[in-house]
Amino acid sequence: MEFMQIAESPSLYILVGVFGIGAVLIMAVVFLRKSWIRANELGYTHDQLKDVVKSSLSFSLVPSIAIVVGFFSLAAMLGVPWPWYRLSVIGSVAYEIMAADMALSSIGRELVNASGTDFTLMMYVMSVSITGGLITILFLGKKLQEGTLKLKEKDAHWGALANSCFMLTIVVVLVIPMILEGGVSLLTLLSSALIAIILSLLVKAGAKWLSSFVLAICLIGAMASSVLWTNLLG
Amino acid sequence: MQTTKEYFHSIHRLGRLCTVAALLIMLGIPTVISLIFGTFPGFLKIITASAGLLAIMVPLAIAEVISYTPILGSSVYLTFITGNILNLKLPVVTNAQSITNTEAGTEEADVISTIAVSVSSISTIVLIALGALLLVPLKPVLTSASAQTAAANILPALFGAMGLGLLGRKVSGGAVIKGRLVAAIIPAIIVVAVTFLSPKIAHQASGLLILICLPITYFGSKLLYKRGKISVRLPTDTVTIEED
């Protein structure tokens, strides 16, 4: 059996579409329904929740299109259904390419001469290797979340500070290499910050409707600017 | 109406159930394909081929769960099932908490985050499905050099705008924290040093770097807070803290 015969087989399309992506879509809808009901019970109005949905939706569009860009690169190597599943569910483009490459190199093969068994091996390796996060959540998810809640109950002031430490650390670890790297990465970062400042001034000046879309507009503007900076810097 | 405890108990139960189901489906698809086509590679081959990647991914996964759960709350289950955490789910959650002025670590933020992650996951699933359906007409546009460049620069585009808000004094929930950046000085020095030594490691092992820096920021903040070097004003407080 050839690699692409399995990679593009109707069986894989059905398994991925119905059981893989279909199941996750149902999970997302169940989580949405449950949290929506709870938000109503907590006193959130329909308009407030609609704002959250609009903002999350508008913000998710651009990164999702970026994921589709990655999907096209991956589909050229691994056929359509498997990358479709992996990128809809758990993976990321960089991880999938690395996993496929490591799986094949471990048996001394390359994509051009890979067999159907090699494709199945790749599917297993990609799946097994990324289960760490899900297994960790099973054991630690509840404990970590309850710990965060208790922190707030004990001392609300320290709780607010402690919770802010997580995002602060993430920003420090991610942003500093972007600044030090310079070039397109730094210019894109600065463009995004500049757009954010301009938009927040507009919101303060009275354009309140913009506030839900600030991050989405910054993202589109800064990503577009990265093309300009790349062309200018060569 | 459920109590907070009952709600969290039920959402964690749902989360765990979905996580187990996602794991079974993830490993079930290759198994069914192996049975249909008779292409099972053998357990030894699977373990050997996965070992290298597991050695990299397991510590990263643990680091991610520890760092992101306090921000994501119980939406962590769906977030990890649907992936794309740093480039999509985490900013979506931060944005949703910011526009509703809720603070991570509260039930309100938890519920709002779950709504945001669910909406974001559904929209990504729908868009990738459209991408798969429209593969032929869309391919020339989305594989163009410009689209690839823009997609490769998604993180600086995100963190430029987000960083400004996240490094400011006002945090989500309306609290104003003065002096909190001092606690990030040592982590910043570590990240600068690692980046100078190897920019590649700084990028690829960011999860581990977060895990190393997180306790330093956390306990540094605690120490500075106890010594009065960091002050926190909550929206409910009547006393104001001194402005610079």
Image (cartoon, helix red, strand yellow):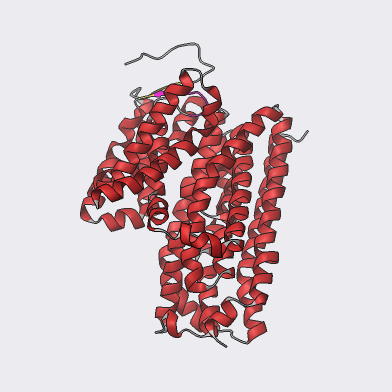
At which x and y percent is residue B237? 51, 15
| Residue positioned 57% across, 88% down in the render | A1
Q: Nearer the viewer, residue A180 or B153?
A: B153
- State whether the magenta stretch is mostly helix, strand or loop: loop
Q: Quadrant of residue A134?
A: bottom right
At which x and y percent is residue A70? 47, 60
| The residue positioned farthest toward the right in the image shown | B1
Q: Is residue A124 left or right of residue B197?
A: right
Q: Is residue A178 visible?
A: no
Q: Is residue B149 visible?
A: yes
Q: Quadrant of residue B216?
A: top left
Q: Is residue A221 magenta?
A: no
| Residue positioned 36% across, 34% down in the render | A193
Q: Is residue A16 left or right of residue A2?
A: right
Q: Nearer the viewer, residue B125 or B16?
A: B125
| Residue positioned 25% across, 51% down in the render | B195
The magenta stretch is B172-177
B58 lies above or below B153: below
Q: Is residue A96 left or right of residue A82?
A: left
At which x and y percent is residue B36? 67, 83
